[in-house]
């Protein structure tokens, strides 16, 4: 069995509606404050569906989707296509470009041609299962990486000088989409991808949810999932760390920590692990050899051995927390929401791919891929 990708008839917003007012980030990075902002932006903002509220919220979300389709707020395309997706964004003062393509990936179990890289939790899968079974729609593509391919890059180049079919702006980032409808170009891309393996970067919960829907409702038509495929070296996708937080410790925590690490106060913050306590930064240099990726090593030594947290504690995030940026981690400590922050060095793409190819699963919240692909730009409806 090979990696099978096909074009699909996307569900999109009516062009009469400004895309800037209705798109949103992926559901799992929207907090309560951001949700209210997006709700207020437009009564047709996709957040009303992907993050519903109230009693019978999933049924209401499905009903709202069907109402928007009936009113032609949302339209299903007449022509099947693959989609080139380009995002222009700023990172550390420099303009960068993310580029890949979106296609419908035929669902298959992990480990054949599609590989996960981190653990999942049951809660988000139950939530997405309830929503997607009601809506029969995936509202954004998940993200997957593949080995770069010259044939696919040549297809991309054919559209470089053409105006995009969709252009949207969100928080200073520009999102452009070109439809690939020519059979010859589609065949070249799909044929090239049959030789590839795909590593899921973002969207593990949605992928496993799709598998669960297919098993629970085999006649529902949930046989594919929309995926944005990106070359590992040239896509522009950034692989960033997710930092660790500890909410509370006993009086012996630092003593136990010093058994495994030398703890040196420093303003340079140049160690693989840097600890912040609200006053000072400390470089932690391991006293034992590290033979595993940093997120696994950290969780094994600090969360398991020193704090003695169980697998269940980790799943429930008992006494642990996460921050997607250094600023967020520092804010949590300064705001007394946690006692210690541990700033981790990002793993490299080589480390990442080597680990995945060996079948090693990283702890949840080990990687943060940036930038994110928006919800509401390219949607995939199944079962029609």
Image (tube, grey):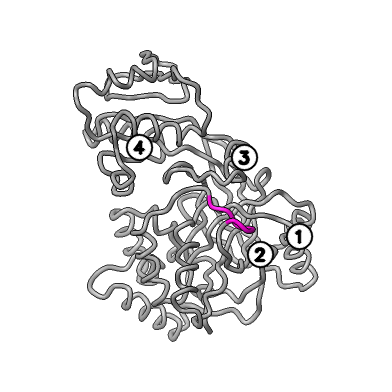
Residue 243 coordinates in the image, percent (x, y): 40, 35
Q: Please, what secondary structure does the residue beneath circle 4 have?
A: helix
Distance between the Cα atoms at labels 3 and 4? 29 Å
Q: Which mark is residue 162?
A: none
Disc number lying in front (1 or 3): 3
User: Do tag 1 and tag 3 residues touch (Cβ < 8 Å)?
Assistant: no
Distance between the Cα atoms at labels 3 and 2? 33 Å
Name the quadrant containing residue 185: bottom right
Name the quadrant containing residue 258: top left
Which residue is outermost to the left?
A: 251
Q: Earlier in the sequence, mark 1 or mark 2?
A: 2
Distance between the Cα atoms at labels 1 and 3? 22 Å
Q: Earlier in the sequence, mark 1 or mark 3?
A: 1
User: Which stretch is magenta?
Assistant: 111-116
Q: Is residue 232 magenta?
A: no
Q: Earlier in the sequence, mark 2 or mark 4?
A: 2
């Amino acid at each position: 069995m090979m990696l099978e990708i096909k074009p699909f008839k996307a569900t999109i917003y009516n062009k009469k509606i400004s895309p800037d007012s209705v798109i949103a980030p992926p559901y799992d990075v929207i907090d309560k404050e951001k949700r209210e902002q997006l709700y207020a932006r437009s009564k047709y903002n996709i957040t009303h569906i992907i993050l519903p509220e109230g009693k019978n919220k999933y049924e209401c979300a499905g009903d709202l989707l069907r109402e928007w389709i009936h009113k032609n707020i949302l339209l299903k395309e007449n022509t099947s296509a693959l989609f080139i997706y380009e995002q222009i964004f700023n990172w550390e003062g420099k303009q960068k470009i993310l580029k890949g393509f979106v296609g419908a990936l035929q669902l298959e179990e992990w480990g054949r041609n599609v590989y996960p890289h981190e653990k999942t939790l049951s809660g988000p899968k139950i939530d997405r299962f309830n929503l997607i079974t009601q809506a029969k729609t995936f509202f954004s593509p998940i993200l997957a990486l593949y080995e770069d391919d010259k044939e696919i890059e040549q297809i991309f180049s054919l559209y470089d000088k053409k105006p995009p079919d969709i252009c949207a702006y969100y928080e200073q980032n520009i999102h452009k989409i070109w439809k690939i409808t020519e059979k010859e170009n589609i065949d070249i891309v799909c044929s090239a991808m049959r030789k590839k393996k795909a590593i899921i970067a973002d969207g593990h919960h949605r992928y496993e949810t799709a598998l669960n829907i297919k098993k629970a409702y085999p006649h529902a038509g949930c046989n594919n999932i929309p995926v944005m495929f990106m070359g590992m070296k040239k896509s522009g996708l950034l692989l960033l760390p997710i930092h660790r937080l500890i909410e509370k410790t006993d009086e012996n925590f630092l003593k136990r920590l010093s058994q495994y690490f030398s703890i040196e106060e420093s303003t340079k913050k140049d160690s693989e692990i840097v600890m912040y306590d609200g006053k000072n930064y400390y470089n932690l240099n391991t006293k034992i050899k590290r033979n595993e990726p940093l997120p696994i090593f950290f969780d094994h030594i600090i969360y398991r051995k020193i704090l003695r947290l169980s697998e269940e504690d980790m799943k429930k995030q008992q006494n642990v927390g996460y921050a997607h940026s250094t600023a967020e981690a520092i804010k949590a400590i300064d705001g007394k929401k946690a006692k210690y922050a541990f700033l981790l060095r990002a793993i490299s793409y080589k480390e990442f791919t080597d680990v995945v190819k060996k079948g090693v699963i990283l702890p949840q919240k080990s990687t943060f891929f940036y930038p994110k692909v928006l919800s509401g730009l390219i949607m995939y409806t199944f079962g029609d």
